[in-house]
Amino acid sequence: MNLSPVLLVLSSYALGGIPSGYIVARRLKGIDIREHGSGNPGAANVYRVVGPVAGLITLAADALKGFVPVLLAARLYPGDSEVAAACGAMAIVGHLWTVFLKLRGGKGVATTAGVFLALLPVPMVPTIVIFAAGMAFTGHISIGSISAALVFPFFALLSRAPLYYSMLAFAACGLILYKHIPNVKRLMNVEKHEQIQ
């Protein structure tokens, strides 16, 4: 028997809320990742604080939190873009505001990538290239993330994605940009400090 759409959507939120970075940092280094680095429990902060292996494990786990519920929705409700988009949306929301860490989650980049690797893999290809280029040229993961979030919704439109997928792309990428406001402020402060010196 298939899961009802409501149960599937709620399960997507719960899966998205699993605090991968927090668990990895606890297991590998015995620390609360929220008390170190930027305080964010996402893959980038885990990478900087705990190390590359821990960061990559967190990245993969966070991406799977978005990919799996969408794939499951597509299998259980083939052709129903509304259910798939709802599951993707709730996985992202679960990651951003996880009940397991008092609603303090990551920035949503990896989980959003996982969602759209399942929903719209073709537009994700140039988006990943832009992410990598932004990170390589600036040395900042946040710049790569912001660059990718700015362009992906338009790649989704160009691919003639279903309406619900395009709506989710704009909403999810808007949330990523919102979550990165502190990063932008920090980078601007660093640049001002360097100019003064």
Image: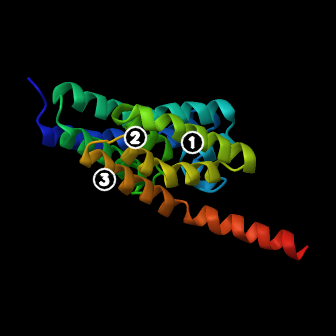
x, y percent for residue 2: 11, 26
Is residue 65 in view? no
Q: Residue furthest bottom?
A: 196
Report the mark closest to the observer, 2 or 1: 1
Task: Tell me the kind of residue under disc 2.
Answer: Ile
Q: Quadrant of the N terminus?
A: top left
In the rendered image, which residue does mark 3 sit on? 167
The tag on residue 18 is: 2
Q: Quadrant of the C terminus?
A: bottom right
Closer to us: 162 or 184: 162
Task: Look at 31% across and 48% down and name the residue there.
Answer: 89
Task: Look at 44% across and 38% down and name the residue there.
Answer: 123
Q: Are marks 2 and 1 in contact (CB under 8 Å)?
A: no
In the rendered image, which residue does mark 1 sit on? 43
Task: Tell me the kind of residue under disc 1.
Answer: Ala
x, y percent for residue 76: 17, 27
Closer to us: 25 or 138: 138
